[in-house]
Image: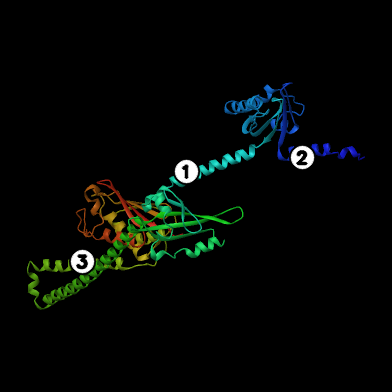
Amino acid sequence: MYTPEENTPQNNKVSLLNFIEKHAAIGTWEFNTKLEKITWSSQTKKIHEVPLDYEPNIELALSFYKNGDNLNKITKVFTDCIEKHEDYDIEVQIVTATGKDKWVRAIGTAIIENNECIKVQGLFQDIDKKTKDAYALAFKEQQLRKTFETALIGMAILDLEGNWIDVNKSLCQTFGYTKDEFRSHSFKDITHPEDFRKGQRAMIDMLNGKLDHHETEKRYINKKGEIIWTQLFTSIVRDSNNQPQHFVAQINDLTEIKKSTEKVSQLLVTTEDQNKRLLNFAHIVSHNLRSHYGNLDMLLDIVKMDLPETTENELFPLIEQAVSNLGDTVVHLNEVAAINIQKDLKTEPLNLLDSFNKAMSSISALILDSKTSVSIAIEPDIHVKGVPAYLDSVLLNFLTNAIKYKKPNEPAKIEIKTSANTDFIILEITDHGQGIDLKKYGDKLFGMYKTFHQHEDSTGIGLFITKNQVEAIGGKIEVKSKVNEGTTFYIHLKKHD
């Protein structure tokens, strides 16, 4: 039942105090200097994490403060409050009864009678979360500041009008300005005239909330008046009310990359022009040689018919052989020119085992006659990208070479297997034949008209054409060899997905 006494001003005051203590995490305390007795409110005890029936004394109260600066600080201000009547309001750390470090705000004021301190009353507030959050924020700001200053990429903070608020060391080095010199210029002042309006629409959209960042390439002018190519990344920073505060810009110097790219482009143009000239030269040479060869061959036929006695001259066979060799050279030049002029070759999936069986079938008589043994370890489902005619030519050339350059008085022995990496099927062909001195001939191995063994059928064109065919379909050839032990060719052929 309600009684009038329950609503007295005194009771209302106590209720309000309890409400404040509970919801603001603020406790009260009092120290009677005459009785040397200290009392804590329930909230103060809660902050110290002690039971509600805990009875502190002055020594116990001070023992909660963390040793070192914190204990020294509270001891001094508490003593000065009693002796000098000086109020205090400090932030210190305590160690609670459960062993937790906790930041608190300690406030004390002296109650004076007859110029003597009879009591010290105060407040005790738990500010642990707020303080730790503040320290964490300060640490993050310090780290961000350190990152900003030491970043290898140029960074800047600009106001909403495009004026520099702050710049880092890298940006100063890129443009040649000091920080003070930067502040005397606006963002627009150092922008290349032709790029002045570049990105303006994006800046307006960022201010209006339509964009939060923008990236573009842009040119600037450094202190020496030189053009600087950059990759500019700009973002906008807003406050808790979503109002724009400032811009943050990252400016990456691309000048050297641009110069290098231009040099590469010029080199590519020059190389392409030279390649076209070389191909034109090859076509002209092969065409003219073909004409001359045709004339010479026709003249020899006429001589044979009209002057048969001339064929008995000992020089005639030499002339005939020279003309025949000229004809072979013309054929080879045409083959090489045809391979190199074709661009965007239409490749198709080719079954590698089927292609090998086809090549083996084509030279089956040669294999039987030479008593060659062939070991093939190719999975039946391996497919590569290629041009059928090119792959047939490549396989036939390596097989016939393996037989041609076998060890004297021994049948040829050929081992064929495959391996794979991310992009290629690697075809390994080992011949166990005469081998090649790679230290002596390695850089000439795939050269035109280069031979390394004495053999009547050696022309020095096979490997040259084969290499061109493999490279034309996106592959490559590697080789390992030892004299009198044999040679292994590693033909990298593109996988078919």
Name the amino acid, label 3: Thr
Report helix, strand or loop for mark 2: helix
Q: Which amino acid type is shown beneath numbered disc 1?
A: Lys
Q: Position of residue 250 (x, y in %)?
A: 45, 54
Q: Work out which quarter of the rendered image holds the N terminus and state it.
A: top right
* Residue located beneath label 3 in the image: 329
- Sooner in the amino-acid sequence: mark 1 or mark 3: 1
Q: Earlier in the sequence, mark 1 or mark 2?
A: 2
Residue at numbered disc 2? 19
Q: Position of residue 28 (x, y in %)?
A: 72, 32
Q: Nearer the viewer, residue 267 or 4?
A: 4
Disc 1 packing (10 Å; few <14; some 14–19; many ≥20): few
| Residue assigned mark 1 | 146
Label 3 neighbourhood size at 10 Å, few (<14), some (14-19), many (20+)? some
Image position, residue 374 (x, y; %): 35, 53
State if disc 2 and disc 1 touch (CB < 8 Å).
Answer: no
SS class of the residue under badge 3?
A: helix
As drawn, the residue found furthest toward the front would be 114
